[in-house]
Amino acid sequence: MRYLVEPYLYVGPALALIGFVILVPLAIGISYSFQAITLLKPGAPEWVGLENYAALWRDAKFWLALENTLWWTLGSLVFQFGLGLGLALLLNTQFYGKRLFQALVFLPWAVPTFLSALTWAWLFNPVIGPLPHWMAALGILSEPYNILGDPELAMWGPIAANVWFGVPFFAITLLAALQSIPGELYEAAEMDGASSWQVFTKITLPFLAPMIAITVMLRTIWIANFADLIFVMTGGGPANSTQILSTYVFTTAFRKLDFGYASAIAVALLALLLVYAVLLLAIRRRFVKI
């Protein structure tokens, strides 16, 4: 009996701490979504049931923010993963100046988000920033103008900043996974005359698949909840063209001071991310079995 109870005594304090720090605030936040809590209307919170969710279903701004969230998340994720995988493959080789290059690759991860957002907002400034002038010189733009003020193009500004900020995550994790692949497999493939593409698709990619699944899942959740860059660079504008669900939660809670409706938006985002995580973990389990 002692051996059955003893492990729980060791992990009990950690579980209690996790429950206090994570589960209790989560339960409180979910309960807020069923109440009318508006700081502009002092008084005791009023239980409204599903009214906040019914209003959410009718809210055109919510659906626009959801569409923008999908675009923001997918656009950032594709470029972050592609560049991160390329850099990991490069850093897994030997070349002159590798240590310096590796430090430069990992540098964006150490820069505070607020500073990154300010820097990229300056880069896109049509008066003092270089990017609009370079794109005009290359023929991408007809003339230098404020990209962050164009509803059709504004989302590309935060996406570019997020790609620069998030590439080191994939580079670090995928590099660690690459270095764990047995070298004997590559030696055998070389002896059999396999091409570089065959080595990549038959050895490297299958070994990376489980790590790719878990890193893509984690990064997707982080990007969907990542409001800092957008809030600093565009504030969700112009005309809500860069408003995502996480920024909508923030503006609803701290500008409109409607914590009940903001909690409903946050719970809707939580539900979507939970469904996504479950599906991706099921796919990862299939890769691991293979």
Image: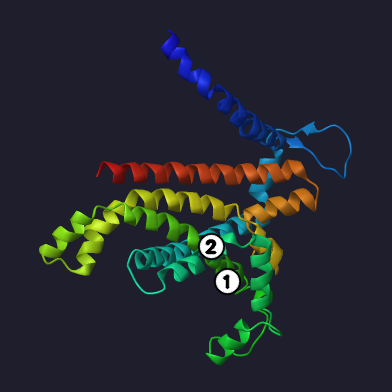
Q: Tell me the crowding category of disc 1: few under 14, some 14 to 19, or many 20 or more residues within 10 angstroms, Cα based.
A: some
* Residue ranking furthest to the top: 1
What element does badge 1 sit on?
helix
Reply above or below: 18 against 84: above
Label pair 2/1, CB-CB below 8 angstroms: no
Q: Amino acid at mark 1?
A: Trp
Upstream in sequence: badge 2 or badge 1: 2
In percent of the image, x 64 and y 60: which residue is there?
112
Left or right: residue 252 versus residue 180 is right
Determine the image quadrant of residue 134: bottom right
Reply above or below: 245 against 24: below
- Would you name the residue on which mark 2 appears? 71
Q: Disc 2 to disc 1, how far (Cα)?
A: 10 Å
Q: Tell me the crowding category of disc 2: few under 14, some 14 to 19, or many 20 or more residues within 10 angstroms, Cα based.
A: some
Reply above or below: 123 against 142: above
In percent of the image, x 25 and y 63: which residue is there?
200
| x then y, percent, for residue 129 | 66, 82
* Residue ranking furthest to the left: 192
| x then y, percent, for residue 62 | 65, 54
Which quadrant holds the C terminus?
A: top left
Given residues 263 and 182, the one toward you in this image is 182
In percent of the image, x 52 and y 24: which residue is there?
11
- Would you name the residue on which mark 1 appears? 156
| x then y, percent, for residue 83 | 43, 67
